[in-house]
Structure formats: C-alpha cells, structure tokens
Image (cartoon, rainbow, N blue to C red):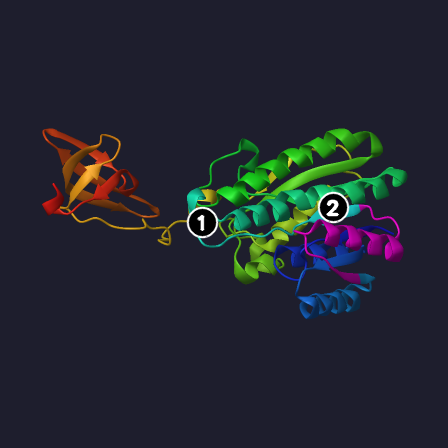
Amino acid sequence: MRKALITGSASGLAVAFARKLAAQGFTIILNYRTSKARCEALASQLSEEFSVTVHTIQADMTIALDIDNMMNEIEQQCGAIDTVVHSAGPFVFQRKRLTEYTALEWDHMIAGNLSSAFHLFKRAIPLMRPLGFGRIITVGFDRVEQAPGWVYRSAYAAAKVGLASLTRTIALEEQENGITANMICPGDIRGKDKEADFREDDLILPLRMPIGADLAHTISFLVDEKSQFITGNIIRVAGETDVITHFDQGKRDVIDPTFLQPGSSVIVLPWRKRGVIVNRHDRHNRRSIYTVQVNEKIERFTVDQLLEVETDDL
C-alpha cells in the first residue's frame, strides 16, 4: 500500500494533490499548521469518496521541532512512507523591496520554503531507503532553475532557488536507493482554481488558465513506479504565461517612500551638488525617475539619490 505525506494540505494546491493520490488508492497523511477543522473535513471527504485511509497531523513547517515531532508520529502511526509532496511554504503577498523586508520576514521565508525541506527530507529519506523506493516532490516557481530575479519577491525567490538545487542534489544522492526527487513549478493559479479538478471543457480548451488539477496530473506521473528515471527535473506546468511578470501586471502596491515635485530644490547625493528637479516620471511598481538640472548638466536619479532642501538653505 502506497503512503504519501502532503504538507500544507488544508487548502490550496495541496488539496488537488491529495485528491489525485487518494483517487489512486494511496494512504494519505495530511499536514496542516492551524486549519485543523478544514484539514479534518478534507480527510473525511477523501476517505468517504475514495475509500482510503487518511490521517491528519499538525506541524508548522517553519519550526524544526514541529517537523521532527510530526515525523515521529508518522512513524508510529504509519511506519514507512514512500512519497512526500512538500507543498507547504509561506509567501509574503505585500510587494516590497529587499531593503523593506524585516529580518523576521526573511527568516520566516527561508525557514518555511528551504530549511523545512532539509528537516523534512532528513527524516523521510531514511524511511524510504529500506523500501528501495521513494518519491519526493517539491514546489517551485516559473524558471526557478535559472535563478531569475523576481522583483519584490526576493526572500521567497531566494529560498525556492535554494530548494531547486536541494531537490536536484537529493536526486543525485538517492538514485542508488530507488528514490527520485523532482520539482514542479505552477503557473499563475489563484483562489479556487488551486483546488479545482478538470472539467470536461478543460480538456478541449487550449488557451485556458492552469488549475490545480494540472499540477496534480503531473505529480501522478512522477510518483508512479515506472517513473524511476524521471528524477532531478524542474518541471514547468505554466503554459505560455510569463508567470513572474504576469503576476505583478497592473499592480501598484510598491511606491517610493516619498515623492518630490518638479521645481523642488535638491542636493544630488552622488555628486554632492545642488540642483533643481525638472521632471518626474512615475512608473508602475518601479521607482520614479527624476530629471535634475545641476548647473548646465541634466541627469536622471531616483528619490534615494536626492535630498530635498528649502530654497532659503541654498
């Protein structure tokens, strides 16, 4: 009997993952952080619909001790597990520059999206090795294997890029034990679409947006016994949408801390000279650009490079 642990499975994409594996007859272990009632309702639904055994277990994936206690309980209840889908991972929805993140937010992103995988797989892999078989799935983002910059998502992106490398390292280290490790990278899936299953129209509409079932279908292939040579891959399940830029289109949450008006007198800090703002060009989700005249010279600067001064001070 196949046994799968799915982290962060009270809501979101993990619900689609759980439904898919339950439909395939897996014993399911659902992990949640705070949403106990929601997770238990999902467990009851899966058990009734697919006639499978479903366990629920609480653990905060940002806390190493919670992960350790969770794995102790899993060993006691289920013994060995052969599949782990690590989908839990915090995300800061507010768009902010690196310099605006707090140390606590940074540590939370790294702990939840990267360190959690270390603590989880350190305990899960030894349970798989005696079986000579195991399947590990992690969740990344579009083009994570290229280590791209993601504006206003520095902490999350850095953690997931690290997770991509970790996933591939596990694939290399554990292939001799029959354990595969792959990462799936979703498209821009939001709201109820994360938990959505395929509808009849979805199979004939080539231009629809991705849904949770697309990721779950990919996972179904990766965890199959016959997929032993599919390992160390970063698999994009996003269609043709550029997820990184598409996600921020039309948003205007990130603004300069202050705005200066044309005609204002300023000190140009890099030059240590005084000048006058000729023009300000505002840009979506990017710094405003100020055109400043200093004597006969005209150049462009951001607000961080200017200091407004009173005319009387000149």
Find numbered disc 2 in the image and state the secondary structure of the residue it sits on.
helix
Q: Position of residue 208 (x, y in %)?
A: 50, 52
Q: CA distance from mark 2 to mark 1?
A: 29 Å
Name the side, left or right, on which 164 lies relative to 308.
Answer: right
- Label 1: which secondary element: helix
Task: State the residue at coordinates (28%, 51%).
Answer: 258
Q: Nearer the viewer, residue 67 or 147?
A: 67
Looking at the rendered image, the disc whose residue lies closer to the viewer, 2 or 1, is: 2
Visible in this render: residue 201?
A: yes
Number of residues whose C-alpha sits closer than 10 Å to that of mark 1, classed few (under 14), some (14–19) or many (20 or more):
few
Rendered-image quadrant of the C terminus: top left
**Magenta stretch bounds:** 55-82
Residue at figure coordinates x 78%, y 57% from the top left: 28
Question: Label 2 sits on what residue type?
Answer: Leu
Q: Amino acid at mark 1?
A: Phe
Say which of 89 and 41 sits in front.
Answer: 89
Name which residue lies at 68% across and 52% down. 63
> Which numbered disc, 2 or 1, marks the residue that appears first in the sequence?
2
Who's the residue at 69% across and 43% down the image?
117
Name the residue tied to disc 1. Answer: 247
Q: Which mark is residue 120?
A: 2
305 inside magenta stretch = no
Q: Residues within 10 Å of mark 2 (few under 14, many from 20)?
A: some
Residue 209 x/y as whole percent = 51, 52
